[in-house]
Amino acid sequence: MSEYIIRRVFWFFPVLLAVGAITFGIARMTPGGPFDTDPNRRQLPAATEKVLRAKFGMDLPFWRQFTRYMLFDIETDPKTKQPKIVWGALGGNLGPTYQSRGSQSVQDYLFRSVSGKPSRFQYSARLGLQSIIFALTLGIPLGVIAALNQNSWIDYILLLISTSFAALPTLITGILMLIVFASQLKWFAIIPKWDDPVRPWILPTLTLGMGILAFIARLTRNTVLEVMGQDFVRTARAKGLGDFLVNGRHILRNALLPIVTILGPLFAGLLTGTLFVETIFQVPGMGTTIVTALGKRDYSMIMGTTLLYTFILIVGNLLVDLLYGVVDPRIRVK
Amino acid sequence: MANGPLLEVQNLETHFKTQDGVVKAVNNVSFHVDRGETLGIVGESGSGKSVTALSIMRLIPNPPGKIAGGKMLFDGENLLDLSEPEMRDIRGNRISMIFQDPMTSLNPVLTIGRQITESLELHMKMTPREASNRAVELLGMVGIPSAARRLDDYPHQFSGGMRQRVMIAMGLSCSPELLIADEPTTALDVTIQAQILELIKRLQREIGMAVIIITHDLGVVAGMADRVVVMYAGRMVEEGVTQEIFENPRMPYTIGLLRSIPRLDESSDRRLTPIRGLPPDLIALPEICPFSPRCDYFVAGKCDAQTPPLRNVGPDHRAACLFDITLQTPIPETAVEAV
Amino acid sequence: MATTIPSTQANAAPEIPLRAPRSLWSDAWRRLRKNVAAMASIIVIILFVLMAIFAPQLSRFSPITQTANNSLRQPFWIKTNSPTTTGLPQHILGTDAIGRDIFSQLMYGTRVSLIVGFIPQVIVLLIGVPIGLISGYAGGRVDNLLMRITDIVYAFPDVLFVITLTTALRETFLGQAFNGLLLIFIALSIVGWTGLTRLVRGQVLSLKEKEFIEAARAVGVPTSAILFKHILPNCLAPLIVSVAFGVPGAIIAEAFLTFLGTGMRPSTDINAPFPTSWGAMLLDGYNNLSSGPWYLLFPALCVGILTMAFTFLGDGLRDALDPRGQ
């Protein structure tokens, strides 16, 4: 098992390198640079621009820029005249952001909390966690109830609601929620104030959560129904076990397997969902960061956040695979 | 209560509602099982034998199925009158059932130890420790080596034959009075089959329980059963002592079955004659002899005018045929050739 | 109780009727017809297609004509105090911030959404299926290499890649072609082909070892024929379902990209076939939310309904084509 983990972690590097290379390549393909494409800012004097370009290492050859960014570079310290290592992404350094003209690093921008307010990463993380917890804690029980009461009115209502929400894209759910609850009913502000710890979170969490909840409820229902028809459930009943034991011990534990399997792709969907939701509800998280960075051609911010998202995604997938090993003994014990 | 048969099934009717109509999967079936004896139920797929067994256990899924009529007297009590909790008390405890495919009949995510102890904890009210010990004993009884260590193993870590032994251990854990074995060896290799059947016979003697063995394999029946019931299209078509049925079958279906299997004690140049045609669609079966489309001895005007009742054709031997047909009766020349 | 032996008179054994055999496809179509949601979805999709084709005939105004004193008009059923914003019957759904008719924009916007849903799927089919076939059939190092590549593309969060690519190349020739749609097609195709490739490869792998393939090889059927006549037809069912499910993702992607200001560019050319898109309407509607929800609501509803239609259709197709059924 540990060998499996090591092998998976080993794969992180080529994947991240490839993703980095692709993003790097795309970013460099853009005509113009970060210092001259923002029409709203004063154009920089040539001298300043030259200094900045040197600072950002844009004078170095392409390949060196890349390795410097992703891995590390060795340069001479101007003060001590000794060679020293400058870490890149490998060491957690995602580079300086262009929009701060080099005074702030990407990881700092994303992870630092300023004057007691949560960091941008924390905003996104909170949104994601809230949504998935909401979806799982409500979705699984609802799915089980629907399956146990198949074809009753409970089942039909649940199917109706979950099919609708599962089919509605998150973007549209968000817009509709915004229109109905914020714009029309005025229960929430269109432009939320984020000092309130609860209010501004409700609509975004519901938007992101409902889509996932609907999906999970339907999946749980179908899985439980399928498991209910399996032979070993008949064996359990033939032993005289009552509904409670049969449902809880035999059915549910087997029904969990496909649900855990789906957590991986679900996690990916969650990540992209946060992009939509953050944009519509103006959540000050990593999603809106990327969007603004794109507008301002802030290469390192774009690369940094992309790498971070990818990293989170592959770690998430690894965790899900491990969880699956815990839940299914057929994988665990060979 | 100590006299009389252990299980007496009278006029059992089990029906299923389908899109195309009502299927009478068990159609007026009556038989009995005495204490300690082995009854074999023989028939092809779709003959209703498994449904009969599930009906006894009252495990017919409702909807779409239901027990539409008849009585099932177990130790004098009609099982159909019991409430569900009372029935649960009997299942796995006084009447046990083991199934055909041990691969799918065991829960893949629970240890086999757990699957055995849950019966013990439920019916025998044992503590977990007592149940564990008893489970080890049971595994030993069914011939699983290193039983104590294997308690914590999962079904996928056992071979097919071993898994079936585990199923048997589970079935016998509460020393039932009646064991129903639904095709217990069909999914296993031939050599393992013999072992499993031997095991069941031995344990039956040790525990003193009755066994209903359901199979399509006449060889299994010959080796295990004291008495045999032959089913076709949901109906009983013949019933009697095993030896009598094999030596003197009186219903053309049974005769056809016996003619179609090779036997060691006959000359090797006898042709194997299969039964022509296919089993009937059970929906809206007309009131004719259900076997008539495939019967070599079919008589127009008689066999298609009524459903032949089971009638006595010998001591403790009943057959559902209007005529006295035996293995020696020649096949009429005008019978249709095999399609 | 008769005890005689049957006589040797002529007997006709009673007949048992057999059920008529059915082909797999007509079976599937029958099942699909029973699915109310799927049938309704087909009708909805056809309606939208008609809307797209006949947009010029259906709209009274051109979607890009700006009229003075006509901005931010409400839909015709809403009356306000101001004569410039009160609803008029000729502008059924009102006007936008620079006086363009919303209903016309909605009609023309259908074109973009349908095209964006459709074309990348075609491209993805053309790329993904051959690669999947080759990868699965050839096996060995070719397969390994291709699978590693799909792993990497798969690890990349889709939407991020599409956003990054479209934004970065916005000002290039690629980004300008077709009002920016070409770039969107390319971006969506690049992230979309992996799913299809894996699907096809999986099917090939499971079929490769089956006896009928061995038999075909033994008879001397060339590889290309094996791939196209034996293996591909077996993949068709999941392929169709995959395409149906891929369409909503593409429509949303375009809507979101344009919403972010990085996707399609609305045109000011009278003769352009794609003057605007629902995404552009979403952006404008969002920015003008304070003057009314309608400008944001209508395109959102259209996107929602169209994507839901494809999702239900995909569900229905999957249930109909899966022989295991219920």
Image (cartoon, rainbow, N blue to C red):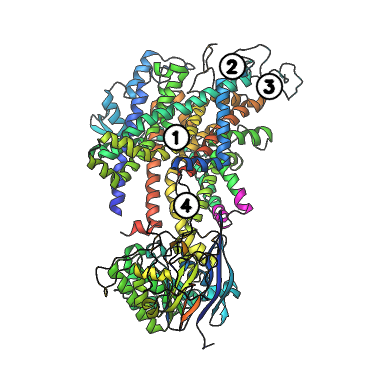
Density class for disc 3 (Cα within 10 Å; few <14, some 14-19, many ≥20) is some
Q: Amino acid at mark 1?
A: Val
Chain designation of label 3: C
Q: CA distance from mark 1 to mark 3?
A: 35 Å
Residue A236: x %, y % from top left: 47, 67
Is A317 left or right of C142, judged from the image as shown?
Answer: right
Q: Quadrant of residue B244?
A: bottom left
Q: CA distance from mark 4 to mark 2?
A: 56 Å
Q: CA distance from mark 4 to mark 3?
A: 60 Å
According to the picture, the residue beneath numbered tag 1 turns out to be: C243
Chain designation of label 2: C
Label for residue C92?
Answer: 3
Q: Compared to A227, does B207 lie above or below?
A: below
Q: Give SS at disc 2.
A: helix
Q: Nearer the viewer, residue B327 or C152?
A: B327
According to the picture, the residue beneath numbered tag 4 turns out to be: C18
Same chain assignment for discs 2 and 1 = yes
Is A66 left or right of C310, judged from the image as shown?
Answer: left
Q: Amino acid at mark 3?
A: Ile
